[in-house]
Amino acid sequence: MKALVLIPSSEYADNVVRDVLYGCWCKGRRIGGGSVPPLNALTIATILKNDGVEVELRDAIEQRMTFDGLARGIESFDAVLVLSSSMTIDEDAAAVRGLKERNPSLKAIFYGSHPSFMPRQCLENPAIDIIVRMEPDLIIRDLLRAMRKGDGGWKRVKGIGYREGGGIVLNEEYPFMDDMDDIPIADRTLLPPGATYFNPIVKRYPYTTSCTSRGCPGLCTFCTAPAFSGKKIRSWSVDRVIEEIRYLIGLGYREIYYRDETFTFNRRRVREICGRIVREGLDITWLCNVRVGSADLDLLRAMKVAGCRLIKVGMESGVQEILDRSRKHIRVEQTRDLFAWARAAGLDTHAHLMFGMPGETGETLDRTISFIKEVDPTTIDIGICSPYPGSELFRELLREHPELGDENRLSLKDLHTAGTYNEWYTSVSRDDLERRIRRAYREYYLRPRYLLRWLRRMKSPAEVARILRGGVNVIRFSLFGD
């Protein structure tokens, strides 16, 4: 069997961050023009390769592929696998439809957030043959094993859906994995030759991404991670984390962007990882997500000594009532402390914020903008809250407005820069949200003190190039939009 693991391109964006399983992806100048390697697609490709499948990964975004390039040699493939989300499902299906016109026997297998949470809607699209629900790694392995036998037994694989006899069949769910060490280290040699990924928060190149755990201690109503990853956090062993670092250094990588929902969910584990990096003299720098309340000054200092350069923080809002309504389960004072401790430890910070959350008003947005300036992260990005299928917010929206049904349509065209149904749970208009997000970027990034700080950082040609490339994208967004 020969399988194509595909990252389709988009007519709406030159760069799309589409590596996380649940697919709340970002794009464009709002994130400084950044891109990341497709870690989860790469992991699937590695699992299939290790299981004896001839596999190729094509990243049409990074490779700037035309459709002819995307379809090159498609007649020789038996299956195409696409990680798809609510924002890309229509474009992804259209790309696969074109591939199937050239190879009618090609089986299209879709996995990710939209296939997991809107399986029937996906299977109503004739371009999609099979959907994989929730955690895909072992399901896809078992599915292709069964398909290779050729006896139709693949229809009994748990966790999939397909069409049959004019109807849609959804098999029972596949259980979550118990031992995360069953997931192999992703084979980075499967990345397209010559592929380079720029990200403004990354300092040392070449860089790669990794994920050492699944799950999150939070139950935020706007997020699909709780439904997608289960309520229990599962993680790689410390030995496996260190094994991967050695492997990546051997390939020439210099920086790792850890994509765990909360890298610091277990402080003892983080201390052990940091201690091993220091004792073994591993020359690597790294960045990771830190949940407010999951780290203190001592832990951040230990991370800094072990090569951590930057922490990413989902602060979302500077208003306690807004955080409480979305069940963020953090305190504004904790956010203030975390940024102060990171500064004391010598770490850069990147803050994620979300405008248009339930209960939002013009006054709460003004308070959040003031709070951003107070805690003063190194960099920020601000999105507009969207009701993703699979989130509690989406379920609440459907309970109040069942007439929306399956018609919730999100698109990369205006992802995170335009309001989607926000009028149902805020008093801020769509146009006002879009204006305020650009105003917040201008007020934050164009402060004289902030600009002077970055001028002082430009100490090498590489640093100048990185800062200017990311900065120009952000300023263009703040002035003109995405």
Image (cartoon, rainbow, N blue to C red):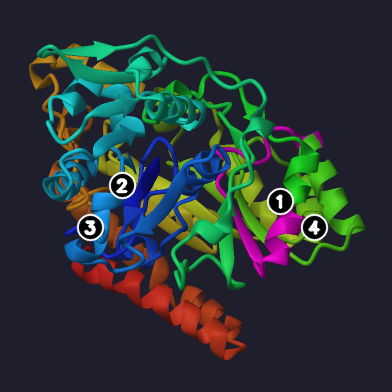
Q: Which residues are magenta?
A: 244-268
Cα gap from disc 2 to disc 3, whole angstroms: 10 Å
Given contact means CB atoms under 8 Å apart, are the residues at marks 3 and 4 in contact?
Answer: no
Image depth: mark 1 or mark 3 in front: 3
- The picture quadrant where one finds residue 151 is top left
User: Left or right: where does residue 17 sit relative to residue 270?
Assistant: left
- What amino acid does circle 2 point to? Phe
User: Left or right: where does residue 76 sit relative to residue 134?
Assistant: left
- The picture quadrant where one finds residue 46 is top right
Sequence order check, earlier mark of 4 and 2: 2
Q: Please say whether residue 101 is visible from this viewpoint.
A: yes
Is residue 247 inside the magenta stretch?
yes
**Residue occupying the point 62% across, 88% down:** 459
Q: Which mark is residue 306?
A: 4
**Residue occupying the point 78% across, 40% down:** 238
> Vertical placement of 456 versus 474: above or below?
below
Sequence order check, earlier mark of 3 and 4: 3
Q: Which secondary structure, mark 2?
A: loop
Q: Residue 172 in the image: state x and y as whole percent.
A: 38, 9
- What amino acid does circle 4 point to? Ala
Image depth: mark 2 or mark 1 in front: 2
The residue that mark 3 highlights is: 71
Crowd around label 1: few <14 · some 14–19 · many ≥20 (10 Å): some
The residue that mark 1 highlights is: 244
Q: Residue 271 in the image: state x and y as whole percent.
A: 82, 43
Sequence order check, earlier mark of 1 and 4: 1
Sequence order check, earlier mark of 1 and 3: 3
Is residue 59 inside the magenta stretch?
no
